[in-house]
Amino acid sequence: MRRPIGRRAATHLSLLALVGATLVATAQQQPTPAQAAPALTAPAPVSNGIEYKVLVFTRSASGSNGATAAGVQAIQQLGRDRRFTVEVTDDARKFDAPHLKQFRAVVFLNTAGDVLNDAQQAAFEEYYRDGGGFVGVHSAIEAEPGWSFLTNVLGTRANGAPSAMSKATVTVADRVHPASETLPQRWSTTDRWYNFAANVRGVSHVLATVDEKSYSGGSMGFDHPVTWCKDYQGGRSFYTGLGATAESYGSADLRAHLGGAIQWAAGVTDGDCGATVLANYQMTVVGAQPNVNEPIGFDVLPDGRVIQTDRRGGVRLHDPASNETTVLAQIPVYTHSEDGMYGPAIDHDFATNKWVYLYYAPPLDTPTGGAPTTSTDPAAWDQWKGYFQLSRFKFVDGDTPSLDLSTEQKILQVPVDRGACCHVAGDIAFDSKNNLWLVTGDDTPAGGGGSGGFSPHNDSVSATGVYQAPFVDARRSSANTNDLRGKVLRITVGADGSYRVPAGNMFPAGTAKTGRRSTRWDSGTRSGSPSTRTTSPTSPTTPPTPRRRRSVVDRRAPAG
């Protein structure tokens, strides 16, 4: 039955009024001419805007794993949170070229045994080599054990069944990769722990290891990788030994771990998986004759040649182009225990001034042998007083390059106790403002003076008047604000070899008389590195705030 024309007209008028009201309201919400319209941005990371697809393969020849369903739910939630579509299947027929090419990454979630035929394996190999991503979770290490390509992608295979479910401590070494950046450095988690047929370190990049002391059943020793990755034959491979228990997928840490792994394998986020893969580096041997006596440090000249030092006083020049080494100088040094030659460093303006810096122990008239550990005479150690000398020498180039020892400018002396071991060091470096940094050792052995392996602080005198040696008391050195040992020093060297104190050290210039040496930038570094020093990203180009401590990573000197 047709409506009367009047009613139809009224209906049309009502619709027009509604549309008009909507347009007016919309117009009223537009910004005024003086306001800028909001810029269009990509969907927020928590939105459901889809970026790519991930295939999760769950088939296992040994039957369903109890943790698989929880793993699927976790990955599906990660997909919603991180904007990727998840397709879950246990159907091996999905492994053909047309289907696989839809996905940025394929996850083997607790797969095991013979799950793909030859044609399906070939399709996956083609997909992977064409830039696809692979994430293996836990028992994926047991998938297709006879498939050599997958073995190479994984990097190794399981050595037997995993341990019983137990709590263990995972040590996270890579704090930058998206799969591990948010994890605790020491992560206590419950899982089943595989031993592996080979250690993948050097072939794959290891993100984390499991501490075998924290659970029962480990057989790989102190270096037991549990999660690793690598770029291989055009694709991206990631494996984690975690994820064997349903409960573990409820952990925010494991979910973040898997989410970062999937994003990296899919190629949508950065992550360096080649940093510790040995094949990515070229090794040039510089230890051939005549460089044979306890090499200590090196620095590289602007033309690529390398200046090296050895503890016995040798300074050498290595030419990587010809693989030849020339002795630049043999400087007499005191060599008891760890004393001797340290450095070198080249000046920030070496191209014009040719200065080479060394830190060494002059022979002086120090007795041979070792100093006594105790004595009834407190002056018994006076003859063992010595010092380390920071100096610079001119490098003379030519057919027979050398250091001109007559040009020595003596910059700074660091008093030390001789005839004892250990914690001697002396790394030198320059920052972008040509400030010189010197890391000094503590000149105090760990375990001395009955300290039980710890930092010694013993200046006791027995009831019979027996004194402890001064070198078993770190309070005189690294703990002493008016002593240069166990410190990071920072100075600016002048044209005549004198130095001034730049702004930003722990104490301002002129405070030495108050028991605070202004050359110090940091203190308490008992084992200064002979070759490496790492500081915060803001330094040394940005002067640190006075008195503010900065982290210093240091390694022991030889035999220390």
Image: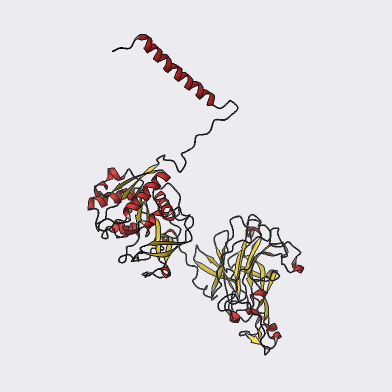
Percent across and percent down for residue 331 are 62, 75
Percent across and percent down for residue 369 are 61, 85
474 versus 250 height, above or below: below
Farthest bottom residue?
464
What residue is rendered at 61% in x and 63% in y? 429
Q: Nearer the viewer, residue 323 or 174?
A: 174
15 versus 527 height, above or below: above
Q: In the drawing, does residue 260 fall left or right of residue 341?
A: left
State which quarter of the image contains the C terminus.
bottom right
Let me know if residue 432 appears in the view: yes
Q: Nearer the viewer, residue 43 or 275?
A: 43
Percent across and percent down for residue 294 are 54, 74
State which quarter of the image contains the N terminus.
top left
Count of numbered labels shown in the rendering = 0
Give the quarter of the image for residue 136.
Answer: bottom left
Q: Nearer the viewer, residue 547 or 132?
A: 547
Q: Nearer the viewer, residue 146 or 245?
A: 245
Farthest top residue?
5
Percent across and percent down for residue 326 are 55, 70
Give the quarter of the image for residue 79.
Answer: top left
Let me know if residue 336 appears in the view: no
What residue is rendered at 53% in x and 66% in y? 318
Q: How is the image coloured?
A: secondary structure
Q: In the drawing, does residue 156 fall left or right of residue 62?
A: right
Q: In the drawing, does residue 263 fall left or right of residue 402?
A: left
